Image (cartoon, rainbow, N blue to C red):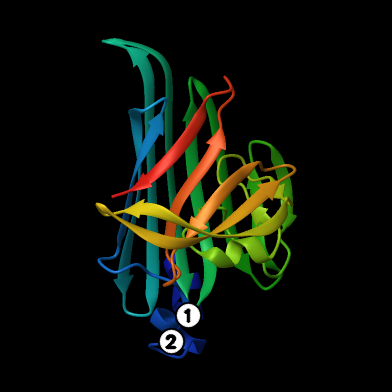
C-alpha cells in the first residue's frame, strides 16, 4: 500500500472531488460474484470500494475450493489492494496462493510512472495507460494491463463482441461483451454504467468457469 508521505504529496496537487466522476465505482461500493463450474458454486469474488477524502481504496478477495464433499482437490486464494487518487492508480499490492504455489506483485507510482515487480516479473515501469487487471475498471482493456497474480504485463487482443444479456442481482441486464485472446484468454462483460458484470473462461482442466454477479 502507498506510504503516507507519498500519498500526502499526491493529495497536495490533486483537485478534490474529481475521483468519483473519473472511475466507475459501483452503486453500493461493492461487487460480488459467485464463481460457477459445471453448474456448482466453487467460490466467490468480491471487490469493496472505500473512499477517504479524495482517495479510493479497492480491496479484492477471491476464494475458490474445488472438491468432493469435505475433500478439497484444488484451493485458490487471492488478495489485492489498489489505491487511486484523482483517477490515477498510485499503488497496488497482491498476494496469491494458487493451490500451494505462492505468487505476489506490487506496484507503486513515482516520477517515472507505475513501477511494478512480481514473482514472474522483474522490476519495470508500466506503460502510461496500463492498469491493474482487476476487471472492475473497463479502461484496463485500453492498454496492456498488469497481472495482479505475478506482475506480468499482459497484451491480449481485445475484440468487442456485441451486447448480450447477463444475470445481475437476480435479474438480467444488457452487457457489452469483450473477447480477450492471446496471453489472456477470456470473455468479460460490462453493463451500461459501465460496471463489471461477468466473466467467462476455460480452466486448466478444460472446464468452463462463469462469474455470476449477485
Question: Please, what secondary structure does the residue beneath circle 2 have?
Answer: loop
Quarter of the picture containing the N terminus is: bottom left
Return the x and y of residue 40 as percentages of the image width and height.
34, 26
Q: Is residue 39 visible?
A: yes
Q: Residue at x 50, y 77 (%)?
A: 87
Question: Please, what secondary structure does the residue beneath circle 1 have?
Answer: helix
Q: Quadrant of residue 119?
A: top right
The disc label shown at residue 30, or none: none
Q: Residue at x 70, y 63 (%)?
A: 143
Q: Residues within 10 Å of mark 2 (few under 14, many from 20)?
A: few
Q: Residue at x 44, y 28 (%)?
A: 76
Picture mark count: 2
When the figure is inspected, residue 112 is found, relative to residue 75, above or below; the finding is: below
For disc 1, the marked residue is 22
Q: Nearer the viewer, residue 82 or 172?
A: 172
Q: Quadrant of residue 185?
A: top right
Q: Residues within 10 Å of mark 1 (few under 14, many from 20)?
A: few
Return the x and y of residue 164 as percentages of the image width and height.
49, 57
Return the x and y of residue 171 as percentages of the image width and height.
28, 55
Q: Is residue 135 visible?
A: no
Q: Nearer the viewer, residue 205 or 14?
A: 205
Q: Are marks 1 and 2 in contact (CB under 8 Å)?
A: yes
Q: Quadrant of residue 120?
A: top right
Q: Nearer the viewer, residue 162 or 94?
A: 162
The disc label shown at residue 18, or none: 2
Amino acid at each position: 500500500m502507498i506510504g503516507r508521505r507519498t500519498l500526502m504529496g499526491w493529495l497536495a496537487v490533486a483537485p478534490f472531488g474529481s475521483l468519483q466522476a473519473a472511475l466507475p465505482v459501483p452503486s453500493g461500493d461493492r461487487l460480488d460474484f459467485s464463481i460457477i463450474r459445471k453448474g456448482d458454486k466453487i467460490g466467490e469474488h468480491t471487490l469493496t470500494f472505500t473512499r477517504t477524502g479524495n482517495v479510493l481504496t479497492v480491496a479484492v478477495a477471491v476464494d475458490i475450493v474445488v472438491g468432493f464433499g469435505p475433500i478439497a482437490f484444488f484451493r485458490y486464494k487471492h488478495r489485492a489492494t489498489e489505491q487511486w487518487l484523482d483517477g490515477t492508480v498510485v499503488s497496488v499490492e497482491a498476494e496469491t496462493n494458487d493451490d500451494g504455489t505462492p505468487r505476489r506483485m506490487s506496484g507503486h507510482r513515482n516520477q517515472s510512472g507505475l513501477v511494478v515487480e512480481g514473482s514472474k516479473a522483474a522490476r519495470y515501469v508500466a506503460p502510461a495507460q496500463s492498469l491493474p487487471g482487476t476487471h472492475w475498471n473497463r479502461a484496463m482493456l485500453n492498454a496492456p494491463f498488469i497481472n495482479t497474480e505475478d506482475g506480468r504485463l499482459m497484451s491480449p487482443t481485445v475484440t468487442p463482441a456485441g451486447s448480450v444479456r447477463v444475470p445481475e442481482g437476480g435479474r438480467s441486464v444488457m452487457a457489452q461483451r469483450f473477447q480477450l485472446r492471446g496471453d489472456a484468454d477470456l470473455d468479460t462483460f460490462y453493463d451500461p454504467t459501465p460496471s463489471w458484470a461477468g466473466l467467462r473462461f476455460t480452466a486448466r482442466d478444460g472446464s468452463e468457469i462463469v462469474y455470476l454477479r449477485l
